[in-house]
Amino acid sequence: METPGKNPDEVKIRKIIVLKSRVAGDKIMINEIRYEIDIATVNFSIPTVFLAGPTVRGNQPHLISWRFRAIDIFKNKVAEDETVNLIIPEFTSKTESDEKRFDLPLWEFTGLQRSKIIMFWIPRTRELIGLTTNHEHGYWMGRDRNKIVYGRPDDTYRMAYLDIMWREDATRTNSPAPIHNTMESTIDSTLERLRV
């Protein structure tokens, strides 16, 4: 299996992705980093946000990723004098499958580990269940809670457990425990924390 980012076709995809970033003059303000980009080439000295949450899979072309809307909100809120990396654990192609791509969990782990903020937006449904998200949320809550900004819609399917554990951990560690209920407030909090 080829390493992501080494294939000439992936280099072309990267150029397309960079062209889709918000640009002020010659300065790229939002870098969209997807699976096609070799995570080892990412400049993590730029403030970086990992967009964690349920991912639409290649066998679910009838679903639309929540990350498209999140990217648009970030593009409208990032100031002209700042640059932000968004780690987007998805393929550029909506129908590409992660089946037998055992390199992707390590790609994601590197992105989670090296990002300044992990923004969990969890719009869980019966189809977009987010089992990996449960693991990531618990792991990072235990490992480095201060990296997390947590949000989900009020009507999200089966979120009581994550909410209970988030609040209980906050009580035990004397940490703040906001649970944002809109994507916009989750992104506002993410950018506020990113700028500190």
Image: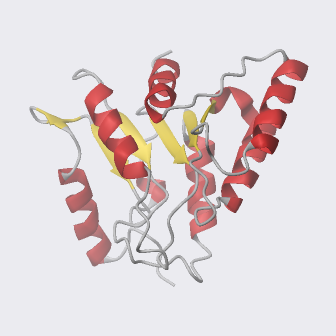
**Quadrant position of residue 46:** top left
Please tell me whether residue 173 is drawn above or below residue 140 in the rendered image: above
Relative image position of residue 173 (x, y in whole percent): 86, 20
Along the viewing direction, whichever of 44 and 196 lies nearer the viewer? 196
The front one of 127 and 162 is 127
Side of 55 where 71 appears, left or right: left
User: Where residue 31 sits in the image (x, y, percent)?
Assistant: 32, 44
Residue shown at 42%/50% (left/top)?
67
Establish if 46 lies above or below 129. above
Q: Is residue 13 left or right of residue 71?
A: left
Position above or below: 4 against 84: below
Q: Position of residue 1 (x, y in %)?
A: 51, 84
Q: How is the image coloured?
A: secondary structure
User: Percent x, y for residue 148?
Assistant: 64, 32
Horizontal side of residue 16 vs 169, given as left or right: left
Residue, x 54% and y 39% (percent of image)?
115
Picture quadrant of residue 54: bottom right
Residue placed most toward the observer, 136 or 14: 136
Query: What residue is rendered at 21% in x and 51% in y?
Result: 20
Left-right relation of 195 to 137 = left
Q: Residue furthest front?
A: 155
Q: Is 193 drawn above or below residue 38 in the view shown?
A: above
